[in-house]
Image (spheres, rainbow, N blue to C red):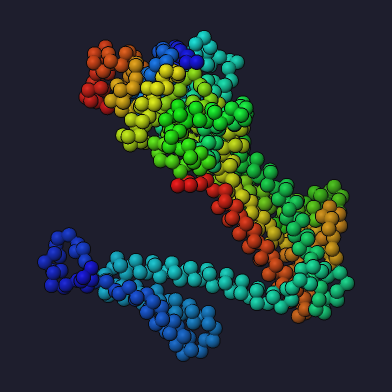
Amino acid sequence: MSNAVIDKSEAPGRASGPAPLRQARLPRWTPYALLVVSAAAGAGIGTALGMDSAFQWGLIAAVVFVLAGYGLGAVVEGGRQARDRLATSLVWVCFLLAVVPLLSLIWETIDRGRTVLDGYFLSHSMEGVQTILPGGGAYHAIIGTLEQVALAAVIAVPIGLLTAIYLVEYGRGRLAKAVTFFVDVMTGIPSIVAGLFILSFWIIILDFSYSGFAGAMALAILMMPIVVRSTEEMLKLVPDELREASLALGVPKWRTILKVVLPTAIGGITTGVMLAVARIAGESAPIVLLVFGAAGINNNPFEGAQSSLPYYIYEQWQLGNDASFNRAWAAALVLIAFVMILNLVARGIARWKAPKTGR
Amino acid sequence: MAKRIDVSGLTAYYGSHKAIEDISMTVEPRSVTAFIGPSGCGKSTFLRTLNRMHEVTPGGRVEGKVMLDDENLYGSEVDPVSVRRTVGMVFQRPNPFPTMSIFENVAAGLKLNGSYKKSELDGIVERSLKGANLWNEVKDRLNKPGAGLSGGQQQRLCIARAIAVEPDVLLMDEPCSALDPISTLAIEDLIGELKERFTIVIVTHNMQQAARVSDRTAFFNLAGVGQPGKLIEIDETERIFSNPSVQATEDYISGRFG
């Protein structure tokens, strides 16, 4: 500790022996200093080359940061440390590349969405609102989204849960393999195809009309494989010892699953379901096809056209004037908030239900 | 009520692999019978055939007869679920239910079977925990999660859970192999007490343990890798450890192989 930098005179004597334990190290603040230097370099080079996008400056700075860290490490510390620094800085740069668009998206949505987002917006529909003028709201779309997503969950969650239980607890042989395969295929179904399927089956062949329920069925098709997959993973995490312990007490298999396996996995299952709900809440394609969109409030999802938040955003954006742009952004903000609240609820439930050690 | 187990010509398979072959033995009621032998010789598999847990493993199947007093466990009309209520089991690694409290863990067998009266539950839980020598350590925190106990306490909790359903036979699959010497001692003492009420069969890798706790000892061995395990001999523990009738037993016990 007292002598962090190696005394060079010692090194040659050990050259043939085992590697010395102490090596030259760069000081701990090196990465931070490099960060400042490369930011400056990015700005400098960017200005010199006449680029005026901050993003381009950032990319230049990132390249400088990675290369400088590697070079400095190679000169002072040797090859292995230099590669370590290279990997570390690459990971950081990639992390920033992933986070910057995300934060920018959230920032943009909040910034533009808050202009018209207020109590009036949340409690009024577009009924009788001249679309070119400010005013109106997304109440009908919020109701539509809530009802359609809830209906989809009511259809998809029981089927998904039971399928996953079958696959993990009972499924052996060909049927289980076939089910797994089709669940995989279903995961990849584009939402518009699910919409077209319900459109041809429910509306064209069976001759029902547009409704929130039709949309909910398409959403359920999209939701089911996600629920199956996440529940399956969670059930697989339940140790077999618990199942055996329960069976050895003379508990029938179905009761073991109901009272031991499911409660142990319930936190993870809830999280999976919530994430699936969040995923389908943003779907617009099936809604365009099946729910048709409405300007007024329709509380009945089984009859008549409804709206939904993604559809509302699309519709308002298409109108192409300032007032409707503002409404679209506000609806986008509501949608993001809805998904985020669901995620938080899921995390809360997962933490609350997680098996406790209670030491 | 402790019961006698009478096994004749029992062979068990995992899929097409024959794990144990043609085992016949008698386990006396109110006694401790220990199974010893090298790893992979089928001791645990044989133990699991005694309460039909073997068939829980995919591909597991059994031929032969296991008589519990005068009933064949593998008879065509026998429900494996009721067999397991009669023949309880304690596993190698303590496995309390993580979602349940200490109280609920002990009551689990009764509650999950639905066969209990609420008023009796407190008494049964207390009796079982006392029977497992755990009552004094946990009586003030019965509502805390069972997973918060130490390894030795968890294993005694599992024993309490197993005896709470009042089985006739208690099977123990290396119950002390994950425990320290002090917890092991506690469980060995407990086995000595439990044999007053139950027929106990214990699998162990620890020959001193077999010598300490058991009345009779069975030695299992296998001819080679991939061969089925066989029962070499079963006799009074004292005889097995002093003067076994088969050379392989003596070699194993004296540490000449295995």
Which quadrant of the figure has residue A109?
bottom right
Left or right of A320, for residue A229: left
Q: Residue at x 76, y 80 (%)?
A: A322
Report x, y in % for residue B119.
61, 29
Q: Is residue B237 above or below residue A36?
A: above
**Relative depth, front residue between A194 and A268:** A268
Residue B57 seen in the figure: no
Q: Residue at x 42, y 18 (%)?
A: B196
**Relative depth, front residue between B234 and B22:** B234
Q: Which corner quadrant holds the C terminus of chain B? A: top left
Outermost residue to the top: B70
Count of marks overlaid on the render: 0
Left or right of A5, for residue A128: right
Q: Residue at x 32, y 13 (%)?
A: B236
Q: Residue at x 68, y 57 (%)?
A: A280
Outermost residue to the right: A128
Q: Is residue A145 above or below residue A31?
A: above
Q: Is residue A107 above or below residue A359?
A: below
Which quadrant of the figure has residue B203?
top left
Q: Is residue A305 above or below residue A331?
A: above
Report x, y in % for residue A45.
45, 86
Report x, y in % for residue A149.
73, 55
Report x, y in % for residue B148.
45, 43
**Relative depth, front residue between B67 and B108:** B108
Which quadrant of the figure has residue A13?
bottom left
Residue B242 seen in the figure: yes
